[in-house]
Amino acid sequence: INPDEAVSIGAAKYAEYRSKDLVNISDVTPLNLGTTILENIFDIIVPMNSKIPLEYTSPYTTIDDFQEYIQFDVRQGNRELSSENSLLGQFILDGISPMPAGEAKLEGTIKIDSNGILTAEATDLKKKKTRKIIIKNYQRLSRKEILKLKAQADKYKTEDDKKVERIMKNYEAIRLINKSKQYLTPFITNKEIKEDLINALNNFEEEILSKE
């Protein structure tokens, strides 16, 4: 059976279930769907148990000054760390309007149609530029596997919470370091003092990164 036939058969089966008013696992999203932010935090776009068909959108921005692209991945799972959730697909949105960190206005959208086909999009609202990926077979897990993943998310929640908190604190510390380099050092006229400050800030940043 070729992929196109498989999609057609799947759609027919889905229609049959719906016509008989039977509850099927494909009627709702069994796990959260989302994307990665700040390296390893899972940001939920579509909560689990969302009724299909659906369309959800979340706002995003850049984390570096004059950043011109983002990598948008699509993951499925209930863990708070992206690396612990299943990667369904990823793509690049490039040509973003170069601005200071946090000023670009971006959107991430996940859609699932009545045939269970998932479309993920990322958009630069200023340029009205969109990139997307289509995933025809995103739901590959059995009911047993889904229950196991939910149980693991509950088991590791406290541990994941601590790791997410550490990532957030480190990100904020590095952001403040970079702002200090950008806005504070130009006003220091003494070359030796300026070099000492920059070295101290660099050492602090390295120490933070080494603990991640």
Image (cartoon, grey):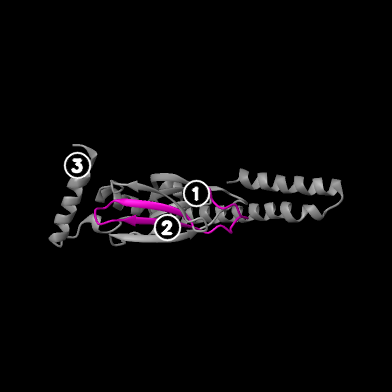
| Magenta segment boundaries in residue numbering | 95-124
Q: Categorize mark 1 by other alpha carbons within 10 Å: few (<14), some (14-19), many (20+).
A: some
Q: Residue 54 appears at what percent x and percent y?
A: 31, 60
Q: CA distance from mark 2 to mark 3?
A: 32 Å
Q: Residue 5: which disc? A: 3
Asked if the magenta segment contains residue 120, the reply would be yes
Q: From this viewpoint, is residue 197 visible?
A: yes
For image coordinates 19% across by 42% down, the residue present is: 5
Q: Residue 145 appears at what percent x and percent y?
A: 29, 48
Q: Categorize mark 2 by other alpha carbons within 10 Å: few (<14), some (14-19), many (20+).
A: many
For image coordinates 71% across by 45% down, the residue present is: 202
Say what secondary structure mark 1 lies in: loop
Asked if the magenta segment contains residue 114, the reply would be yes
Say what secondary structure mark 2 lies in: strand
Q: CA distance from mark 1 to mark 2?
A: 13 Å
Residue type beneath disc 2: Ile
Check the picture and name the quadrant holding the N terminus. top left
Residue type beneath disc 3: Glu
Q: Residue 40: which disc? A: 1
Residue 179 location, quadrant: bottom right
First in sequence: mark 2 or mark 3? 3
For image coordinates 38% across by 61% down, the residue present is: 56
Say what secondary structure mark 3 lies in: helix
Asked if the residue at tag 1 contacts the one at tag 3, i.e. Cβ–Cβ closer than 8 Å, the answer is no
Q: Is residue 74 above or below residue 53?
A: above
